[in-house]
Image (tube, rainbow, N blue to C red):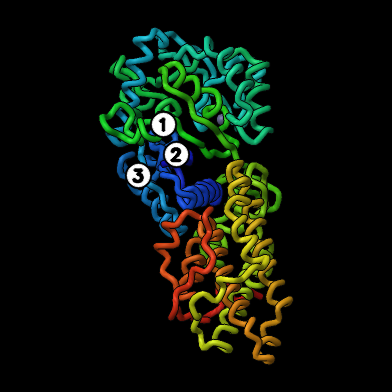
């Protein structure tokens, strides 16, 4: 059995989930569902990143202990994933014992390999970003190059991970594996960074006196682990790294880490180096997607223009929201969210194209055959719907292997439009009038096409796929267990009863 391991980043729990978190997770869920449809054994991991100064401060502001605060926030992420129909295989929290053990093993092992050293450090520190900056990086401004807030001068002893010696190896790896970092703009970004800058050894500890909320450093009672160093390790700790008979041997290396473009460097520079230094194979691919804006501004908490996924779901439904995010912009580019754009997609793609196809077909089934589909009605059909149904999975796979979600959806919609055109061309109402024996074959073919369309739609809009199968009088389970690339035609059994029911997507004003 082919395996597929994919992850979202672990979401930092200093605030509630927003559209950016939803975007990565929906994309991961669609990819996981598609791979399962294609017969892969899938491990889909998500979770929450819970240590560090920002969490400590946010919990103090709410008058909660960091533990109680992270319990509460972590649950808001799980609740949203449930509302969005996200089927992850594991949800890891960096405060779990299995994770802490793995982090401490990294410490000990890198120390044994003499890749960790202790040094007095003086530098400029930005608390909100939890980042140290060199004199050169601040350009004498005493302001954070990232967030432009004032920096603090800090002098303390810390542990450093000697990453600089792996720079040439990493450059070579990226050069040899053009699909390791995607899309190409992000690959070029990491490449340019590595070519232009000498890597500075990574400070991987924080003094406990300043920050207590972190993974204990096994080398010193006075230090805890830097939150980024801790968080990245989740990708191996969650699949049972170093545990007997675990998923690790089955699923590692990871096939794709899905991330937002703002966390490109930790994932394409620090993480591969951490793994390589540990003699662990590095992931196949890191894919960084773009940002969602509203009115041309990046959504951020400080700007107060965050789209709340819960409100969009309430207004349009979770499937329409999932569809919109993956259809509206190519994965990797920035997008703009607006209710107007959302309504347009809803009315044209969902209500008109897909909804009408389903409704018209089932209405005619009712009118001409009292909803009963005779067996073998489509057996002898040699038409465009049958021919293209057999291509659909492969066409989608070609795009989804490159994480081109919008192009995969365009493939399904071109098939949907083919089916709508088929109705016009065949004109079942004329065939009915003429009492033509072609009518059962035409209607059977449309029902087969709808069943296949639901299979294609399933990764993106699972609730809608289930509704279509139900309307067709079919049980979803055997369909989902069948490999999508071996589409059967003539699937319906004698006595199948269809049901028109309510429209899938009632048009919106
Ligand atoms: Zn900053």
Marks 2 and 1, how far apart at CA: 7 Å
Per the model, the C-alpha gap separating discs 3 and 2 is 30 Å
* Spot occupied by residue 426 in the image (x, y as percentages of width and height): 70, 78
Tag on residue 174? none
Is the shortest distance between ligand 1 and the CB of mark 2 under 8 Å? Answer: no
Residue 234 is left or right of residue 403, and the answer is left
Residue placed at 36% from the left, 20% from the top? 106
Sequence order check: which comes first, mark 1 or mark 3? Answer: 3
Q: Nearer the viewer, residue 163 or 137?
A: 163
Left or right of 386 in this view: 201: left
CB under 8 Å between discs 3 and 2: no
The local secondary structure at tag 1 comes to loop
- Report x, y in % for residue 462: 48, 61
Q: Which quarter of the figure is the C terminus placed in? A: bottom right
Q: Is residue 185 visible?
A: yes
Residue under label 3, please give it.
Answer: 69
Front-lying residue, 348 or 19: 348
Among numbered discs 2 and 1, the one appearing first in the sequence: 2
Q: Is mark 3 within 8 Å of ligand 1?
A: no
> What is the total number of numbered labels drawn onto the structure image?
3
Label 2 close to label 1 by CB (< 8 Å): yes
Q: Which residue is mark 1?
A: 252
């Amino acid at each position: 059995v082919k395996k597929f391991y994919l992850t979202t980043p672990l979401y930092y729990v200093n605030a509630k989930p927003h559209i950016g978190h939803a975007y990565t997770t929906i994309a991961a869920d669609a990819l996981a569902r598609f791979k399962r449809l294609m017969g892969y054994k899938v491990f889909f991991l998500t979770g929450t990143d819970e240590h560090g100064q920002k969490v400590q401060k946010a919990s103090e502001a709410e008058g909660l202990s960091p533990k109680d605060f992270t319990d509460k926030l972590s649950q808001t992420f799980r609740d949203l994933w449930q509302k969005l129909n996200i089927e992850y295989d594991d949800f890891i929290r960096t405060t779990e014992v299995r994770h802490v053990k793995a982090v401490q093993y990294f410490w000990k092992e890198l120390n044994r390999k003499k890749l960790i050293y202790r040094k007095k450090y003086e530098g400029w520190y930005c608390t909100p970003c939890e980042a140290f900056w060199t004199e050169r990086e601040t350009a004498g401004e005493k302001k954070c190059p990232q967030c432009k807030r004032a920096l603090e001068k800090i002098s303390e002893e810390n542990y450093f991970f000697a990453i600089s010696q792996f720079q040439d190896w990493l450059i070579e790896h990226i050069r040899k594996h053009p699909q390791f970092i995607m899309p190409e703009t992000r690959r070029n970004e990491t490449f340019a960074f590595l070519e232009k800058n000498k890597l500075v050894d990574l400070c991987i500890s924080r003094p406990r006196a300043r920050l207590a909320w972190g993974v204990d450093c096994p080398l010193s009672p006075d230090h805890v682990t830097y939150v980024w160093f801790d968080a990245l390790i989740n990708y191996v700790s969650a699949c049972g790294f170093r545990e007997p008979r675990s998923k690790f041997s089955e699923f590692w290396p990871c096939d794709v880490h899905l991330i937002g473009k703002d966390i490109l460097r930790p994932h394409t520079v620090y993480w591969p180096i951490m793994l390589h230094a540990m003699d662990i194979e590095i992931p196949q691919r890191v894919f960084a997607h773009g940002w969602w804006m509203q009115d041309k501004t990046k959504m951020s908490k400080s700007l107060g223009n965050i789209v709340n996924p819960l409100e969009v779901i309430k207004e349009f439904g979770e499937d329409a929201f999932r569809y919109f995010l993956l259809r509206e912009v190519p994965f990797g580019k920035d997008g703009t969210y607006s209710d107007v754009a959302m309504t347009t997609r809803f009315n044209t793609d969902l209500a008109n194209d897909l909804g009408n196809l389903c409704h018209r077909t089932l209405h005619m089934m009712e009118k001409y055959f009292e909803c009963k589909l005779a067996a073998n009605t489509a057996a002898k059909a040699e038409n465009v719907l049958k021919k293209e149904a057999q291509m659909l999975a492969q066409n989608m796979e070609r795009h989804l292997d490159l994480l081109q979600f919008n192009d995969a959806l365009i493939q399904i919609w071109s098939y949907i439009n083919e089916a709508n055109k088929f109705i016009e061309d065949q004109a079942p109402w004329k065939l009915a009038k003429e009492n033509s024996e072609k009518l059962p074959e035409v209607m059977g073919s449309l029902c087969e096409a709808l069943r296949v369309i639901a299979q294609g739609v399933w990764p993106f809009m699972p609730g809608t796929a289930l509704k279509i199968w139900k309307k067709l009088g079919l049980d979803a389970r055997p369909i989902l267990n069948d490999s999508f690339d071996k589409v059967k035609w003539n699937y319906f059994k004698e006595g199948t009863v269809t049901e028109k029911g309510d429209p899938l997507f009632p048009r919106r004003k």
